[in-house]
Image: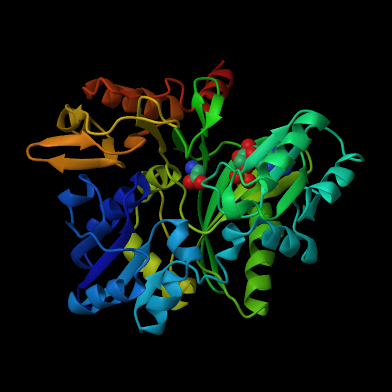
Amino acid sequence: MGKINVLIIGSGGREHSLAWAIAKSPMLEQLYCSPGNAGMAQMSICVALDVDDHQAIIDFVVDKNIEFVVIGPEAPLVDGLADSLKSAGIKAFGPSAAAAQLEGSKAFTKDLCAAHNIPTAAYGRFKDAATAKAYLQAQKMPIVIKADGLAAGKGVIIAEDLRQAEVAIDDIFNGQFGAAGLELIIEEFMEGEEASFFVLVDGEHCLAMASAQDHKQVGDGDVGPNTGGMGAYSPAAVMSEDMCARTMREIIEPTVLALKSAGTPFCGVLYAGLMITSQGPKLIEYNVRFGDPECQVLMMRLASDILPALMATADGSLADITLDWHDQAALSVVMATQGYPGSYDKGSIINGLDQAGRQENVTVFHAGTAQNNAEIIATGGRVLNVTALGATVSEAQSRAYNGVNAIDWREGFCRSDIGWRAIEREKANSK
Ligand code: AMP
Ligand code: GLY
């Protein structure tokens, strides 16, 4: 097979790590990224295309002879970009809008779980406050209230008591999350340890990738407001071989079969957010794309060429693919602009990136960065992902923080305890 041109849609650390992995492929001729960032610009040609203008993307793909498009974020998937590309005869990685409902509508996923006996929290769906509050009266606390639609990871409230739950219901129906909150879900609170599990799916066949854990909260010790993710590591210790096998059998495979039977097969990466409970794995939610920053740790651990695997996912030929993984652990520390996840300034200058990236087993993935003449400046909330491999999570952590220390960026901050749960476990096991 000849070499091919590839386009990646997105500009986060997730997309930089995908670009980094794809850039290593012997199959690659030229990589394009849209819009990309300063890190992606080092390995690709970055172009500013309007992601909402599907025809403009199709025209660019045709003009540049691009054979494969990788769609990173959820919004263009839910918006049907993969469908538009497919209709134009262009191969794309990422599910159709119909299958992306797994992430786009929590109610859709809960109903699918109920219909196919997939373990998840008990729930109710509501379109008005009075009925939702009436349902609450018979429920145990704490309880979980979720806006139905896409709310950038912020549409979930864990209410400790009835009053908090009622306030959350009123807030959602009063438009706190806009159209995402036209409907809400009330869910049983599940106890356990969380893990993320990533599986490539070509509509029919599944190829389990790896597990990870992320740190959603902004502060050390997992406190403070939720963010898109302040750091991650892989693998997740709770995801033993047996737990991975159960997750495939009890959760992933029935989901894939259900969507295929419904005539809306899922093609792409299925990201299961799991609660590992005393009864086994239960689904918290699905995402229909790689996690950010989980993708960064997965790409560091992947030993195989990612490009044929992503193409086979789009082609329906995943049964022919295997992936090799490094035994090492990977850990990523997110550096964000001070103020994030609230408001923050843009334009501060970042130095020391080369020194950080030259360290043993350290790779710095960019998120919100841009090149401004000779300087790299911060343009977003989450800005850098300092990512490292190590024999243990502890070693990966110390390498990642050595990388962080080499970066000179006064306006930035990071958590100092990424991976703490796994590291406590490693310490306990070595005693
Ligand atoms: P989600 O956006 O659905 O992943 O929810 C965000 C976070 O809320 C999850 O990562 C969990 O920490 C928590 N969460 C969501 N649903 C539940 C549940 N039913 N029980 C316990 N925690 C939950
Ligand atoms: N890190 C969480 C997410 O990508 O949704």
Residue pushed farthest right? 138
Residue 204: image x %, image y %?
57, 74
Is residue 153 placed above or below 362 in the rendered structure? below
Residue pushed farthest top? 431
Left/right placement of residue 377 relative to residue 175 reads: left
- What residue is drawn where x is 79% and y is 66%? 115
- What residue is drawn where x is 78% and y is 52%? 128
Left/right placement of residue 395 relative to residue 256 reads: left
Is residue 403 placed above or below 252 in the rendered structure? above
Residue 11: image x %, image y %?
31, 51
- What residue is drawn where x is 28% and y is 73%? 56
**Which quadrant: the N terminus?**
bottom left
255 or 134, nearer to the observer:
134
Count of residue discs: 0
253 or 189, nearer to the observer:
189
Left/right placement of residue 356 relative to residue 227 reads: left
The quadrant where residue 167 appears: top right
Give the colour scheme shown: rainbow
Residue 405: image x %, image y %?
27, 20
Q: Is residue 276 visible in the rendered structure shown here?
A: no
Is residue 25 placed above or below 283 in the rendered structure? below
Residue pushed farthest front? 174
419 or 143, nearer to the observer:
143
10 or 3, nearer to the observer:
10
**Which quadrant: the C terminus?**
top right
- What residue is drawn where x is 67% and y is 37%? 157
Residue 411: image x %, image y %?
28, 23
Q: Is residue 380 visible in the rendered structure shown here?
A: yes
